[in-house]
Image: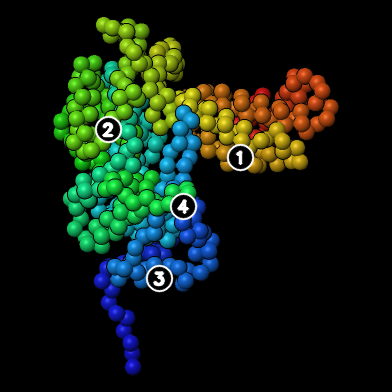
Amino acid sequence: MIFKEKQKSQPISKRQAWDAFKAVKSNDGSAGVDNIEIVEIERHPGKYLYPLWNRMSSGSYMPVPVREVLINKVDGSKRALGIPTVLDRVAQEVIRQELEKIVEPYFSANSFGYRPKKSQHMAVAQCQANCQKYNWAIDLDIKGFFDNIDHRLLIRAVKRYTTSKHILMYVKRWLDAPIQKRDGSIEPKQGKGTPQGGVISPLLANIFLHFAFDTWFEETFPDCAYERYADDIIIHCKHFKEALNVLAAVKQRMQRCKLEIKQEKSNIVYCKRNQKNHPPFKPKYVQFDFLGFTFKPRWIKDKGRKAHLSFTPAISNKRRKRIGQTLYKLKIHRMVQFSIHDIAILLEPKIRGWINYYGKFRFSEMRKVFRVLNYRLMMWVRNKYRRFRKKIKTHAFRWLCNVARHYPNTFVHWQYGFRP
């Protein structure tokens, strides 16, 4: 007798679950409240992935609480991240891939966050181009965006794209999943917020802001421009009065969408890009930060042109400080058991990452970053070699300069000319 597999109520295949696991594995990440790591699931896929697919395809899947993790911000405050379990991240990836194919064609070209074939560099490049066209920019900061997304409005936004019952059902369940605090207590959701560490949260945030901001702004202010990367928004206006009206309208719009604009961090910035034109008053703000880059007036010299003033991006002081803190926490000066080539191999991924991201715009500003790194290497020389310990730092620095001169390819940043 041949037994046929009972037809599942939800259109989710085994292939979708397996592809979702591979995507979650590529992004790595820690375990959730169940302490099950990605390696464990990879070793026993039949034990974990098959039951997950079985529950999702039958509609009986229910997410477990999200583990809360606090991370340090640049200003010293704490940011709460919600880390779902690996299996919950796999389930979210299944729905995310399906939902993204539906909503992606409708998103605005000015939205860059967490989208295929879009990047942070593209958002920064468009912002730079708009700063050359518009005299004023509005730096918007939404207060606790991921923690304050209204569930009812979000579900309404998702329903505008799809009526698939399994997508809506699982999105509601993830939104309602409680949070496990660091002390082990369980905190239920209050009808708002989506875990910032969730796989599907960025897509849901884009869907929410597509209706809350993108479509509304493009219809209301067609003469203005903007860039949005998730909840980071820069608006460009031609006149100061226009910027005041736009900022007031955006605040009202966010209030209607049950969000709040940070008054102290939302500023109107004058984009000074030449020495001739000046506003009739002294602007209070003349620079802003966007995606780790500081936009401010700088002297540049193009080929065939004299040096002139332009409003351009470069690595921000906050990110330089963060990199400096990272280098300090690595304790390079204490790695005396390693050779200088071993340290170069250890630091190579980080240095390449910093150069590839922050060196995209005004590469010369990276010298301030690698000056700190060369100083940490000089301290390593003093601790490594006894003959330098009781001498002034200049002797160790000369030894490092001599190595950089004879072996300029040892460290990645030395290859780009940032030698001691």
Q: CA distance from mark 3 to mark 4?
A: 27 Å
Distance between the alpha carbons at the discs numbered 1 and 4: 39 Å
Q: Which mark is residue 184?
A: 4
Circles 1, 2 touching at the beta carbon (< 8 Å): no
- Sequence-first tag of 3 and 2: 3
Of tags 3 and 4, the one toward the viewer is 4
| Residue for badge 1 | 348
Q: Nearer the viewer, mark 3 or mark 1?
A: 3
Which of the marked residues, 3 or 4, is nearer the chain's N terminus?
3
Marking on residue 51: 3
In the image as oriented, which residue stretches furthest toward the right? 387
Tell me: residue 263, above or below residue 352. above
Q: Residue 171 is drawn in which quadrant?
A: bottom left
Q: Position of residue 419 (x, y in %)?
A: 65, 26
Q: Residue at x 26, y 6 (%)?
A: 280
Q: Is residue 395 above or below residue 45?
A: above
Q: CA distance from mark 3 to mark 2?
A: 41 Å
Q: Nearer the viewer, residue 194 or 270?
A: 194
- Quadrant of res 58: bottom left
Q: Residues within 10 Å of mark 2 (few under 14, many from 20)?
A: some
Q: Which residue is located at x 32 percent, y 49 percent?
A: 189
For residue 409, above or below residue 31: above
Q: Secondary structure at mark 3?
A: helix
* Residue lying at 39% horizontally and 67% vertically, measured from the top left: 52
Q: Residue at x 72, y 36 (%)?
A: 334
Q: Amino acid at mark 3?
A: Pro
Q: Secondary structure at mark 2?
A: loop
Q: Work out how far the residue at label 2 is from the one at label 4, CA to CA, in angstroms.
A: 30 Å
The residue under label 2 is 260
Q: The disc labelled 2 sits on which kind of residue?
A: Glu
